[in-house]
Amino acid sequence: MEPITFDERTTASEIWLVGAGDGAEIRPSERDPSGVLFTIRNGAPPIHVQGLTLSGSVHVAGGRLHITRCVFGEDQAHAQRRRSLQGSETPPPRALTIVAGDAIVEQATFLNFTGGAIAVAASGNLTLRDSQLRSNQADFGGAVLVRGGHAVVERCLIEGNRAREAGGGLHVIGGTVVLRNRTVLRGNEASFASSISIASAGAVSYVLPTPLAHYVFVTGLLVNRSLVTSSINVDFPFPCPGGVVGH
C-alpha cells in the first residue's frame, strides 16, 4: 500500500482497520523506500488497528492510535531494497514511533526489526500491554528507545533483543518509563547494559508485582514501586537464586 497520512483533513469520526482473518497483512509500497505504512498527525480522528500483520512502520505525531492483536514484522525484501536505495548510513525505521499524541498497544508482537521495535520521543505517550518484543535490534535500545515523553509497559515480555551500543532491551535518555505488573526483560544483549540503559535525563521505575521467582529492590518511602537508578546488565526483574525462599 502507498503511505497514508491521517490528519485534520481526514473526514471521519473514527477509523477502523480490521483484519478479515488469519494472515491479513498490510505491506509497504515497493515504490516507497521509507517502509512507512501510515502516519497519524494532530487533528486526525481516533485510529483503531486490529488483527493485522503490519510489515512496515507506523508513525504517531499527534492524535490517538489504538492497536490490538497485531503482529509487527519487518518485510525483509523491502528492507533490502531500502538499504540499496538509501545506503547503509541511513538508520532503518522503528516499527512504531510516537513523538506526539497517544498510542495504546495491546496483545501485539514485535519481531525482527533491524531498526528496533518502538521509539518514544518529545511529547509522545505510549501504553503497551500484554505484548511481546522479541529479536529486534538497533544501535541503542534494541527493543525500546525512549528519548522523551512517557511510556507504561505492563505485563510484557522483552526478550532476545540486541543493541550494538547500549540498552539491549530498553535505552532511556529522556522522559519517563514505568515497567509494571510482571513485565520482564530477559536474554537481551548489548555492548553496555544488556537489559536497561539509563542516562541522567531519563527515569525508570518498576511497579509490583514482578513475575513469580523474580524480585526488585524497593527503595525509599515509595509504596509498591522500585526506582531503577542505574543501568542493568542482567535479566530484570532479577531472577531469585535457586533455593531461596522469600516473604
Image (tube, rainbow, N blue to C red):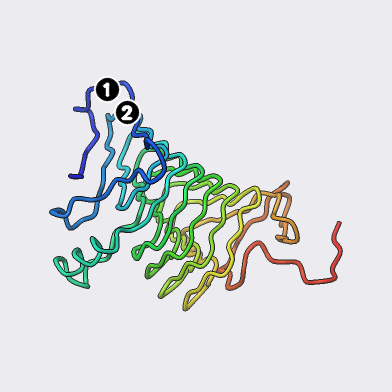
Find disc 2 in the rendering and name its residue. Answer: 15
The amino acid beneath tag 2 is: Ile
**Vertical arrangement, residue 81 with respect to residue 71, above or below:** below
**Vertical arrangement, residue 4 with respect to residue 88, above or below:** above
Quadrant position of the N terminus in the picture: top left
Tag 2–tag 1 contact (CB < 8 Å): yes
* Of the pair 127 and 173, the residue shown nearer to us: 127
Residue at x 58% of width, y 52% of height: 179
Separation of marks 2 and 1 at Cα, in angstroms:
7 Å
**Vertical arrangement, residue 74 with respect to residue 107, above or below:** below
Q: Which mark is residue 171?
A: none
Quadrant position of the C terminus in the picture: bottom right
Find disc 1 in the rendering and name its residue. Answer: 12
| Residue 120 in picture, x, y percent from top left | 40, 51
Viewed as shown, does residue 43 lie left or right of 113?
left
Residue at x 61% of width, y 58% of height: 184
Viewed as shown, does residue 2 lie left or right of 58?
left
Residue at x 23% of width, y 32% of height: 7
Mark 2, secondary structure of its residue: strand
* Of the pair 246 and 107, the residue shown nearer to us: 107
Residue projecting furthest to the bottom: 191
The amino acid beneath tag 1 is: Ala
Mark 2 crowd level (few <14, some 14–19, many ≥20, 10 Å Cα) = some
* Of the pair 186 and 80, the residue shown nearer to us: 80
